[in-house]
Image: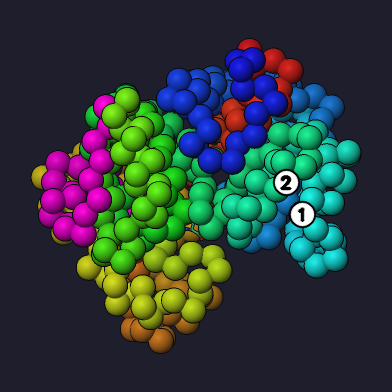
Amino acid sequence: TEQLTGKHFLTLKDFTADEIHYLLDLAADLKAKKKSGTPHHYMKGQNIALLFEKPSTRTRCAFTVACIDLGAHPEYLGKNDIQFGKKESVRDTAIVLGRMFDGIQFRGFDQETVNGLAENSGVPVWNGLTNEFHPTQILADLLTIKEHIGHLKGVKFVYVGDGRNNMGNSLLIGCAKVGMDVRICSPEVLFPDEDVVRYAEEVAKDSGANITITSDIDEAVSGAEVIYTDVWVSMGEEDKFKERIDLLYPYQVNKAMLEKTGNQDNVMFLHCLPSFHDLETEVGRDIHEKFGLKEMEVTDEVFQSKNSFVFDEAENRLHTIKAVMAATNGNETS
Ligand code: CP
Ligand code: NVA
């Protein structure tokens, strides 16, 4: 509604549980409109800059298609296409883009950069992933859980793997806000950022969330309704494959882990993607040769199983990103 108009979307810390639920309901409504062919040109005539320092399939495509469905024009600006980052500062780039565009999406390395764009551009800025946070992804994850389980409060949610990356941090915040039973399961050196854990614990006092940070897999997955994992090596840390494989191999999501939940028939498997569930890719083949692995954070068996909702989740990136843009920059939302 109106209270989100003009707001940036930089991290879920800036949004209340009610606002998150509002965005999820709007996304569900926009999804229904898309499926029924009902027009929803809430950003008619706008121009939107999509700024990328890192590659992307889902986020780029979701922002692009969402812009067009909303009646806006998307413009993709890769890091190597513009002066930004080489000859021109974040501040000057923000001011120039803000003079020409009605909104800016940024994906890249530092949270500081997306914050800097927000401070200087004068138009809404949306975070499409930084090293620290990936907030639009969490909305798609929550929508997918809501669609299949029917509610969010109290849902036993386990994130297993690299707890210290953008996904670990953002899931902890988002799941805490909506009152879930969230368990982050990682080796201790990969526990989420301490500030984020403290923040989530504070939020949990109000939301009724339960927060567990543990390296114990049996404790974490017991009774799980959702198991979520992400790659062991994120964009920008490609020198860490050996170290992460050694640390995280026991945390692989496989059939044995699903069985440990005691809920193997119903537990949902989620992953933000892209995923190394098989190593039939350029990077995958390289890892296979160097480390002798066949699969990494999730087995192909689980990825392809009836427990897996990863492609519903990927599609929901479109509807949730559309909701974020419509709510913060649309003329109307119904
Ligand atoms: N999940 C996600 O953000 O995917 P992309 O890197 O393809 O955008
Ligand atoms: N943690 C991953 C998420 C990709 C969507 C990365 O940052 O590469």
Specify start and end residues of the magenta stretch as a single range. Answer: 208-230
Q: Quadrant of residue 312?
A: top left
Q: Which residue is mark 2?
A: 117
Q: Which residue is mark 1?
A: 90
Q: Is mark 2 within 8 Å of ligand 1?
A: no
Residue with the most extreme top position: 334
Measuring from the top left, give residue 74's x and y in whole percent.
77, 41
Q: Is residue 92 left or right of residue 218?
A: right
Measuring from the top left, give residue 118's x and y in whole percent.
70, 41
In the image, what residue occupies the spot 36% across and 84% down? 291
- Badge 1 element: helix
**What's the distance in space between the residues labelled 1 and 2, CA to CA?**
6 Å
Asked if the residue at tag 2 contacts the one at tag 1, i.e. Cβ–Cβ closer than 8 Å, the answer is yes
Q: Quadrant of the N terminus?
A: top right
Q: Is residue 255 visible?
A: no
At label 2, the amino acid type is Leu
In the image, what residue occupies the spot 59% across and 52% down? 111
Q: Is residue 184 visible?
A: yes
Tell me, yes or no, whether the highlighted magenta stretch contains residue 215: yes
Tell me, yes or no, whether the highlighted magenta stretch contains residue 64: no
Task: Count how many numbered circles sit on residues in the image.
Answer: 2
Is 159 situated above or below 62?
Answer: below
- Badge 2 element: helix
In the image, what residue occupies the spot 59% across and 28% down? 323
Measuring from the top left, give residue 142's x and y in whole percent.
41, 34
